[in-house]
Amino acid sequence: MGFLDNSGDIILDAVLTDTGRFRLARGDGSFRIAKFAFGDDEINYELYDKNNANGSAFYDLEIMQTPVLEAFTNNTATMNSKLLSISRDNLLYLPVLKLNGSGNSSHQESALGGFIVAVDSKSEEATADGGYGIEPGVVRGETLNGAFIRVDQGLDTTEVSSQFTLAAELTETQYIIEMDNRLGYIVSPSLGTNTQVSRADVSFIDDDNIASYFLSLNNSNFVVSNTQRNTAQYSPEQVIAGPRGTTITFSLGASIDLNTSDFLFDQLGSTQAAGTTGNPTGQIVKFIDTIIRVTGATTGYRIDIPVRFAKVPV
């Protein structure tokens, strides 16, 4: 890996993704270039100097001379800031994704921040509160109930009333969830005693064992339109201040490796004394910290949600 020569000529440096290289290597005709993306990870737009004494041709000179890395295929380290093309030229605000941890305790974060997945029945019992319920932010990774994760999308500004409908070209209708396939999987949230929990289909698993799930608005188990138009002041469930698009809700199940074995905890994780309500003080807990990444397929906006897979050793 090195830097591109940006001294004069415009250079287009393109590479295949891990999935593209996999399909090319299969040689069965499944390889076809259907999409491409641009990114500007290296660019600092604050270098734009509209007061440059040499004139407008020099306003963006420092930006144009910024060293740019050669394209490389590691999806965990590149294309963190994808570029977006929108035909409208009168937009003052762009939509965001925002973790919704307010109002309903079912999707509140844990006291440690993020979410905790109890990977087996013993760990689920250890995270129960004094009333034998579930601690906020704790997902039951074996019985597949308890807390779930909710992400809202829309314009998070009070300058545009939430009574307005978000434009179709800014509304996310499909989301991509990425997570370590060794640790768990995505399921629909358990919203009541009669709710049927369904496991999401994995779209593909890359060479780093990162599973990608594509969940669309047509799949009502995960993605729904946010039709609530009241302001956040009068709707405690809402975290988007302006026009709202869609919400995605999901929960997590623990992999069979975490449920039945300590191997991955010993290889990838750590141990510490737990201090949650209903758990004996000083009890040792093994855990693995990871990230669940949620990306909007329309705008490319994404957020990383911290998740801890926890296990009380036998």
Image (spheres, rainbow, N blue to C red):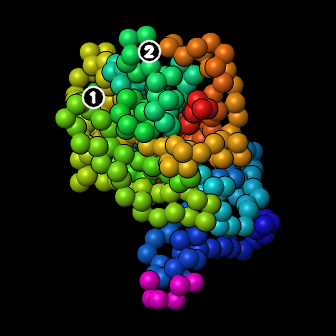
Seen at 62% across and 73% down, the residue is: 15
Seen at 54% across and 45% down, the residue is: 260
Residue 113's label in the rendered image is none
The location of residue 124, given as percent across then percent down, is 46, 28
- The N terminus: image quadrant: bottom right
Mark 2 vs mark 1: in front: 2
What secondary structure is marked by label 1? loop
Image check: 251 left or right of 233?
right
Seen at 65% across and 47% down, the residue is: 264
What secondary structure is marked by label 2? loop
Foreground of the two, 110 or 80? 110
- Residue matched to label 1: 162
Image check: 136 left or right of 166?
right
Q: Which residues are magenta?
A: 25-30
Disc 2: CA contacts within 10 A as few (<14), some (14-19) or many (>=20): some
Q: Is residue 240 above or below residue 111?
A: below
- Residue matched to label 2: 129
- The C terminus: image quadrant: top right
Foreground of the two, 90 or 309? 309
